[in-house]
Structures are given as C-alpha cells and as structure tokens.
Image (tube, rainbow, N blue to C red):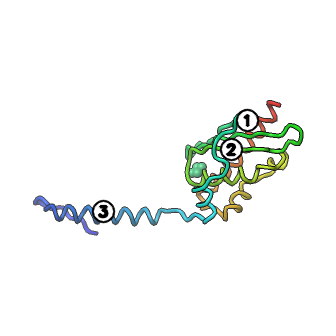
C-alpha cells in the first residue's frame, strides 16, 4: 500500500478505500502477532476448571508477575488429618495463558497431599497443556508459584 500526500481534498470514495486498506493491514498484523496455543491451552482457557472461591478456605493468596502485571488469586482447603488438598479454586486477572495455567495447576493439585503439591513444577504444567509459546512460560511459573504460596500460607497459619 502506497500512501501519497495529496494537495487536493480526497474524495469520500478514496477515504473509504483508504480506511478499508488500513483495516486489512491491521488485521494482517494482528494475525501475524497471534500466538499459537495448543488445543489443551484453549480448552482450559475457554472452560477453566476450579474457577471461583472457596467458602472458609484455609489459605487465600494473590500473586502477580511484576513484568506483565497479571495476577492470580488462589484458595486452598486442606484436610487436617490427611493433609490432602480437598479443594483449590482460583480467579485470574490476566492473559489467556494465565487462566489456562492456573486452571491446570488447580486440576493437578486437587487430591494431592501438600507435600506432593509442593513438588509441582512449572514445566509439568506447560507439558500438561501441550506446551506454551516461549514468551508465555512465565504464566505457568506464576500459576505454580501461587499454589506454593497458598501452601506456605496454610503451613504458617496452622
Ligand atoms: S502474560 Fe504474564 S501471566 Fe500471562
């Protein structure tokens, strides 16, 4: 597309044509910028598991990534005898990967003992989702760190 400076007023037709060309260019740029997410990431993003809040949670935390500004709030309910995470729920304040990885972390942590859940690594979450774009790996780090922070808070308060 070539834009030239005109000395005369452009006609309405030319303005509409130029607007349409700019819209098409913007769409092309957006498509090129779009990240390639796996079907599993899209599934967790569109149908997040364990979304919401737990009434009378044993620990509630909010963790954020200082660089992107995204946050996750997470709550856990732990069986006092068995130390099994009975319930874990989250709220996302972030990107699609933030939602998908938080969803996957809660799914993996639920039913595990707190000692088992402490061993969950960000790479496990990324692998479970079929991989993440490299620039989105920190989203799974944030999700796992939020879970670990919730466990730490639970242990400190018990
Ligand atoms: S871009 Fe930062 S958590 Fe997703």
Identify the residue position indicated by label 3 in the image.
22
Earlier sequence position, callout 2 versus callout 1 = 1
Mark 2 or 3: in front is: 2
Q: Which mark is residue 57?
A: 1
Residue ID at (68%, 51%): 141
Residue ID at (80%, 32%): 156
* Residue contact between numbered discs 2 and 1, judged by CB atoms under 8 Å: yes
112 vs 119, nearest the viewer? 112
Earlier sequence position, callout 3 versus callout 1 = 3
Q: CA distance from mark 2 to mark 1?
A: 9 Å
Q: Tell me where residue 66 appears, x and y as whole percent.
A: 59, 42
150 vs 26, nearest the viewer? 150
Mark 3 or 1: in front is: 1
Residue ID at (53%, 62%): 35
Which image quarter holds the C terminus?
Answer: top right
- Report the side of 139 relative to 156 (left or right): left
* Residue contact between numbered discs 2 and 3, judged by CB atoms under 8 Å: no
Identify the residue position indicated by label 2 in the image.
89
């Amino acid at each position: 597309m070539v834009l030239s400076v005109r000395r005369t007023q452009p006609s309405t037709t030319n303005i509409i044509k130029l607007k349409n060309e700019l819209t098409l260019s913007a769409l092309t740029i957006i498509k090129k910028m779009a990240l390639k997410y796996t079907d599993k990431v899209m599934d967790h993003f569109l149908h997040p598991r364990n979304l919401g809040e737990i009434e009378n949670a044993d620990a509630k935390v909010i963790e954020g990534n200082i660089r992107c500004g995204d946050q996750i709030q997470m709550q856990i309910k732990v069986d006092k005898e068995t130390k099994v995470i009975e319930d874990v729920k989250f709220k996302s304040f972030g990107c699609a990967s933030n939602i998908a990885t938080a969803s996957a972390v809660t799914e993996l942590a639920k039913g595990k003992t707190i000692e088992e859940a402490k061993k969950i690594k960000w790479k496990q979450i990324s692998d479970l989702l079929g991989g993440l774009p490299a620039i989105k790996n920190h989203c799974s780090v944030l999700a796992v760190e939020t879970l670990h922070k919730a466990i730490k808070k639970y242990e400190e308060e018990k």
